[in-house]
């Protein structure tokens, strides 16, 4: 298992950076369940460059658990990216990860995310500038290409490798595919053969079970496996990957409650109101915002359990902390695993969570 820069990770399983999901509470839980690395959700380099207080709040992390702390940033301007990385280092980042795969239009239109797939030299320049500016290991996450006619993952690897990238994660779908279709793991195997032991290759895409992870490692030869959707509502997957047990009902209920309460605290300290509100009014508004934001997690945690559909209908009407706590205790302490549940519940829109 190749190290990432100076860091020898404790195992080969990494949580994918997911927008709206990979905030500090969820990363902390994933680390505790066994994940070896948990990069942040994508953070705007422009926001950091401008010292935007809201953006800076995304940098919060738990230094006792998040080791090493990997900060993912996105942007298209090399100098801005380099300065943003310096600010990230000042706030504790030990690894800088560059998002070169996000397919969302509001990201790509600024030359960031998967738009960098169209310009490998500029992508390499970003890596070199950030390395020179921070002295930190720089990693990147790419896709197989912009579309089916420009699958240039080898060219990207060559450019990034020449710039000194410390590790490269590849999601083997094109930007045009978004999150549809099937991930082409042959791309991961091809890329690993192409770079050899030059730097670690992290495979990503369609890993939802222990067997999936084992199969990816065996068939592609990648150094690490990155798990995104498979961990939504199931951070215990990392424990299972290391030979641990599935969660009990009591354990599931306890962790969901903990995640919600830590999310509530996290979001409450994130809000910056532009209105003149009393502390009581601001607290009520912050609580409601946190509850609304956490609904997606509750739906994911219910996946595969008997009565999940009814519970998700209930979740969409929850408004207060007390309602969430009561609903979690009632449902998760009594819900059994449903062997007949579909492999993926299509009414949960995973795309809204992925960056």
Image (cartoon, grey):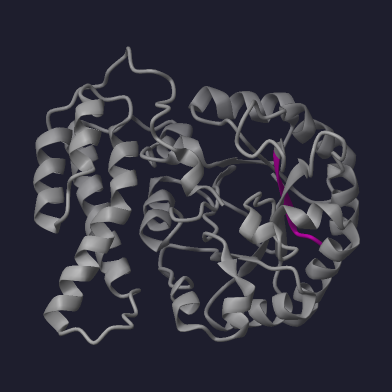
The answer to whether residue 170 is seen in the rendering is yes
Q: Nearer the viewer, residue 206 or 106?
A: 106
Q: Quadrant of residue 143?
A: top right
Q: The N terminus appears in which quarter of the rendering?
A: top right
Q: Residue at the top extreme? A: 340
Q: How many marks?
A: 0
Q: Nearer the viewer, residue 70 or 295?
A: 295
223 left or right, relative to 242 = right
Rendering coords of residue 353 (x, y %): 47, 48
Q: Residue at x 30, y 75 (%)?
A: 269
Q: Residue at the front extreme? A: 275
320 left or right, relative to 342 = left
Q: Nearer the viewer, residue 45 or 115?
A: 115
Rendering coords of residue 74 (x, y %): 65, 65
The range drawn in magenta is 165-171
The vertical placement of 133 against 223, above or below, is below
Q: Residue at x 46, y 83 (%)?
A: 53
Rendering coords of residue 213 (x, y %): 57, 30
260 left or right, relative to 272 = left
Q: Quadrant of residue 184?
A: top right
Q: Nearer the viewer, residue 34 or 127?
A: 127
Rendering coords of residue 132 (x, y %): 80, 78
Magenta: main secondary structure: strand
60 left or right, relative to 10 = left
The vertical placement of 235 against 98, above or below, is above
The answer to whether residue 135 is seen in the rendering is no
Q: Quadrant of residue 70?
A: bottom right
The vertical placement of 50 against 115, above or below, is below
Residue 71 is inside the magenta segment: no
């Amino acid at each position: 298992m190749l190290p990432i820069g100076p860091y020898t990770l404790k195992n080969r399983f990494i949580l994918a950076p997911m927008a709206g999901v990979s905030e500090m509470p969820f990363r902390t839980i994933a680390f505790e369940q066994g994940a070896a690395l948990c990069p942040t959700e994508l953070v705007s380099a422009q926001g950091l460059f401008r010292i935007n207080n809201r953006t800076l709040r995304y940098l919060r992390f738990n230094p006792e658990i998040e080791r090493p702390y990997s900060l993912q940033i996105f942007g298209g301007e090399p100098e801005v990216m380099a300065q943003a990385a310096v600010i990230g280092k000042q706030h504790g980042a030990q690894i800088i990860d560059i998002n070169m795969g996000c397919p969302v239009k509001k990201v790509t239109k600024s030359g960031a995310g998967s738009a960098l797939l169209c310009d490998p030299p500029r992508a390499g320049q970003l890596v070199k500038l950030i390395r020179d500016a921070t002295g930190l290991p720089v990693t990147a996450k790419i896709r197989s290409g912009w579309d089916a006619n420009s699958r240039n993952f080898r060219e990207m690897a060559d450019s990034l490798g020449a710039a000194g990238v410390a590790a490269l994660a590849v999601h083997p779908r094109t930007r045009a595919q978004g999150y549809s279709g099937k991930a082409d793991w042959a791309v991961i195997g091809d890329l690993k053969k192409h770079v050899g032991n030059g730097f670690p290759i992290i495979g990503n895409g369609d890993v939802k079970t222990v067997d999936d992870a084992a199969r990816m490692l065996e068939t592609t030869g990648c150094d690490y496996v990155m798990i995104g959707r498979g961990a939504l509502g199931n951070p215990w997957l990392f424990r299972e990957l290391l030979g641990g047990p599935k969660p009990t009902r009591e354990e599931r209920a306890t962790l969901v409650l903990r995640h919600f309460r830590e999310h509530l605290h996290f979001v409450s300290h994130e809000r910056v109101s532009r209105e003149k509100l009393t502390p009581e009014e601001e607290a009520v508004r912050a609580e409601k915002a946190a509850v609304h934001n956490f609904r997606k997690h509750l739906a994911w945690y219910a996946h595969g359990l008997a009565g999940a559909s009814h519970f998700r209908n209930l979740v969409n009407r929850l408004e207060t902390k007390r309602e969430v706590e009561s609903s979690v205790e009632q449902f998760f302490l009594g819900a059994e695993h449903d062997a007949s549940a579909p492999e993926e519940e299509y009414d949960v829109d995973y795309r809204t969570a992925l960056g």
